Image (spheres, rainbow, N blue to C red):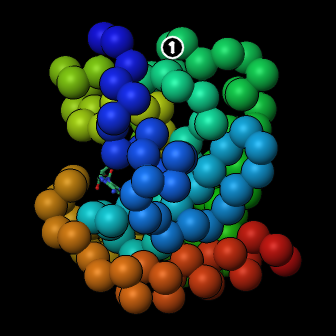
Amino acid sequence: MNYDKNNIFAKILRNEADCVKVYEDSKVLAFMDVMPQAPGHTLVIPKFETTNLLNLPDEFMEPILKTTKNIANAIKKVYSPTGVMIMQLNGKEAGQTVFHLHFHIIQRSSGLEYKFHSRDVEDFDKLENEARKIRKAIAI
Ligand code: AMP
């Protein structure tokens, strides 16, 4: 599948669409998923046009995995879940719906409601409130 420059994450990277930022550096951007499956659901994307992980240049591997790990640790600090799910889908048949590579970071605990994928849009104020806590925990 060819990379579509008009996918929503490409627009976020070009500042043509809004997002609630959690972290950014020269190689990666992390922001809140607008349809969170659990509070704090964060996405990490490379600043590189690729639909999936299989075509990501090696120079982005360390930054994207390091950021994913740091945010997973921040989510642990903020929500104290018993588990953290890191999910990354490659291709429509694998369930991918946005075709710019992304890693999901989702807290999991027994008893915590785990919502459907891409179902309910959360309002930006609530997302900003969660992002603030995660940003603070990354810094510690
Ligand atoms: P996937 O199925 O792995 O491609 O997941 C795409 C994710 O992107 C879903 O969890 C959606 O909720 C999320 N999503 C879609 N549009 C946006 C957006 N504008 N900002 C943030 N997250 C989004």
Judge by depth and name the residue closer to the eye, 19 or 92: 19
* Figure quadrant of residue 100: top left
- Tell me the residue at 60%/18% (across/down): 56
Q: Tag 1's secondary structure?
A: helix
- Tell me the residue at 60%/28% (across/down): 48
Q: Is residue 83 visible?
A: no
Residue 121, horizontal then vertical, whole percent: 22, 70
Q: How many callouts does the rendering have?
A: 1
Residue 18, horizontal then vertical, whole percent: 43, 64
Residue under label 1: 54
- Tell me the residue at 54%/12% (across/down): 55
Q: Is residue 13 visible?
A: yes
Residue 35 vertical position relative to residue 102 in the rendered view, above or below: below
Horizontal arrangement in the rendering, residue 18 relative to residue 36 (left or right): right
- Tell me the residue at 67%/39% (across/down): 64
**Quarter occupied by the C terminus:** bottom right
Q: Is mark 1 within 8 Å of ligand 1?
A: no
